[in-house]
Amino acid sequence: MDPSASITIDDSLWPLLQVRFPSAFTNSQQEQYLGRLLAYLRRGERYVGILDTHLLKNTTSEQRQRQADFIKEHEALFRSCSLGTAGIITSPLMALGARILIHLKPMPSPYYVASSLPAAVTWAAERLELAGLFGPAERVRRHFGLLAERRTG
């Protein structure tokens, strides 16, 4: 595994929180990610997440269990802050891993499995709108080039 590969978190379009996973990550990297995620949850602000796992090859059973435990430990925070999470999953193996995780601990907020970034962004923007966050939804769509062209006349 490339030691420079890490889980990246991008909040530049907040309240959209984008997380990108490398092809593999260590338990230590997972703990760093979960620590940062907890800091966002403790802010108490509503947000929607996109988890981009298209590069991720597999996770260990220990990593899946840790993720399930984290969700269980902080379920109340997820319920109050998370408007939902779109997971970009293109690998059948990762789809199986996601099903195992959801079996271990059902998601405390809406969850959508997307096959592409545009599909995930479209869903995330809709979740923002449902929460009355129209400005951020439009900003997210504009950033990803998903705004419909306006016609005149």
Image (cartoon, rainbow, N blue to C red):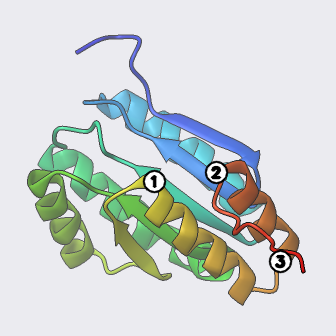
Residue that numbered label 1 is attached to: 117
Q: Is residue 106 above or below residue 64?
A: below
Q: Residues within 10 Å of mark 3 (few under 14, many from 20)?
A: some
Check residue 144 in the rendering and tell me which mark sits there, or answer none. Answer: 2
Amino acid beneath label 3: Phe
Q: Residue at x 32, y 64 (%)?
A: 68
Which is more N-terminal, label 2 or label 3?
3
Q: Which mark is residue 134?
A: 3
Asked whether, in this view, residue 113 is left or right of residue 44, the answer is left
Instruction: State whether residue 20 appears in this view.
Output: yes
The amino acid marked with disc number 2 is: Phe
Residue 137 falls in which quadrant of the image?
bottom right
Q: Residues within 10 Å of mark 2 (few under 14, many from 20)?
A: few
Going 66% across and 53% down the picture, which residue do you hit? Answer: 145
Identify the element where label 3 is drawn: helix
Q: Is residue 115 left or right of residue 93?
A: right
Counting from the top left corner in percent of width and height, residue 77 is at: 62, 73
